[in-house]
Image: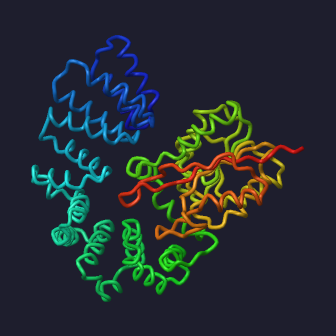
Amino acid sequence: MLMQQQAYPSAEAICQQLLARNPKDFNARHLLGVIKMHAGNPLSACKELKRAAELPVAERFRAQALNNLSLALKQRSRFDEALRVQEQALTLVPDEESFQINRLYLLEVLESWPAIIHTLQQHPSLNPIDELQCLFARAERHSGATEKALARMDCALSEDDSNLETLGEYCLLLSLSGTPLAPEKLASLTIEQLESVADYLAEEGYLNTALPLYSRLLELDPKHAAARHMVDAATGELAEHAPEQYVRDLYDTHAEQFEQQLVDRLGYRAPAMLSDALTQLLPHHLSRVADLGCGSGLLGRSLRKAFHIEELSGCDLSAGMLDEARKQGGYDLLEQANLLDWLRQQKQEQQPLQLICATDVLIYIGDLGAVMKAVHQALTADGTFAFTVEAAEEDLELATTGRYRHSEAHLRQRAAEAGLEVISCTRFPLREEQGRMQTGLMVLSRKPASI
């Protein structure tokens, strides 16, 4: 009951009391692991759930512990191991539907489309489950069974025509089968439907297919920031930066699912990797630290674990993401602000920063000259600027995803012009994107001390 109320410390204390009396109490050990998982501590959750799964209990109870262990491993982005553990649970209780569903979602993360099709063939009882229809259709599409997937989505839409994910997959399959969305159907879509379907198509790598929908959005709302930005991306128009309203709306919409989507599904580890790199460069004790575009606080939490920080500040355009960061904790100050305005305010208030970080935020800014100059002015002498971007082969690109990519040459040139010294610029695996790992650049730079 306490766990369901999110009173995790109190719930954990009860489990610890029981385990102090009997370390082999399966229920207490198992529930302790689940509590730690819900409290956002998957590492400790894995430890407790492994111990629970090793206790001498009935197979159905051991299977429950293994299932939850798989979910905790998934939280840690250890997808292959999570899949192995989930399959162990299924060997104990092969007909448990919820275990099969959890396994299917892991296979989707791993993009194991043939394995999903095989599971569907082996367990036809899964076929009619509503929540799995898009997953099965994507697997069929990736396996070349476009017409079968289209029939599935057509049937799903007849059951629920308000499901935007289903509508997006349906429109994509129509296009792939050589039957673009009919003009009258396009005209009947609401602004919300147009935006959702267009974004789905773009995220799946079919921006050209999405272009008529974004164009229709601009007809209905000429000031629609997201549509304008994505049309620019499709046509190669290179604006200075993505519209603020586009970025704000994008992250407000996905705030609650952001970490699960980015970390669990796309294998995003830039905050942890940047934090690890900084431990090799900086002292353990830091004074004032800023996290630009802090989002839900992934980087802030990593920095708190790695360093003793006197004051950690974060800024972000998205109120929804800032709410998530407040829930997770770790920051002393959080402000909704444009990062350039926020940096200039620090300079005006004469509050120099020892460390400024930015992960997955400069991808919405084109030329980084102004950012580098503002960072230089906000840093203390010998202060550090550490950030990640998507890697470009040429100077500067606006990708069809709507995100900017920067070359090492561009970064080094703009840093030098601003008076920053690049210590290192390293290529690293940033995130999964349309079945391929997107390459990022991790840059450590510093403001030279005054002579």
Q: Is residue 449 above or below residue 369?
A: above
Q: Is residue 225 shown to the viewer in this render?
A: yes
Compared across the picture, whether 92 is left or right of 300 comes to left
Q: Determine whether 355 is above or below 195 in the image.
A: above
* Image quadrant containing the C terminus: top right
Return the x and y of residue 40 as percentages of the image width and height. Answer: 45, 37
Q: Image point 22% across, 63% down: which residue?
A: 137
Q: Quadrant of the N terminus?
A: top left
Q: Is 52 in front, or is 76?
A: 76
Name the residue at the right extreme: 451
Q: Nearer the viewer, residue 329 or 139?
A: 139
Q: Vertical placement of 128 versus 174: above or below?
A: above
- Name the residue located 71 percent from the left edge and 61 percent from the top edge: 414
Q: Is residue 237 above or below residue 66?
A: below
Q: Quadrant of residue 406?
A: bottom right
In the shown orientation, is residue 187 left or right of residue 92? Answer: right
**Farthest bottom residue in view:** 184
- The image shows residue 362 at horizontal and vertical percentages of 60, 59
Q: Is residue 257 visible?
A: no
In x, y percent, where is residue 80? Answer: 31, 41
Q: x, y percentage for residue 120?
A: 14, 54
Q: Quadrant of residue 127?
A: bottom left
Residue depicted at 32% across the width and 65% down the height: 165
Q: Which residue occupies the extreme top position in the image?
A: 21
Quadrant for residue 78, please give it. Answer: top left
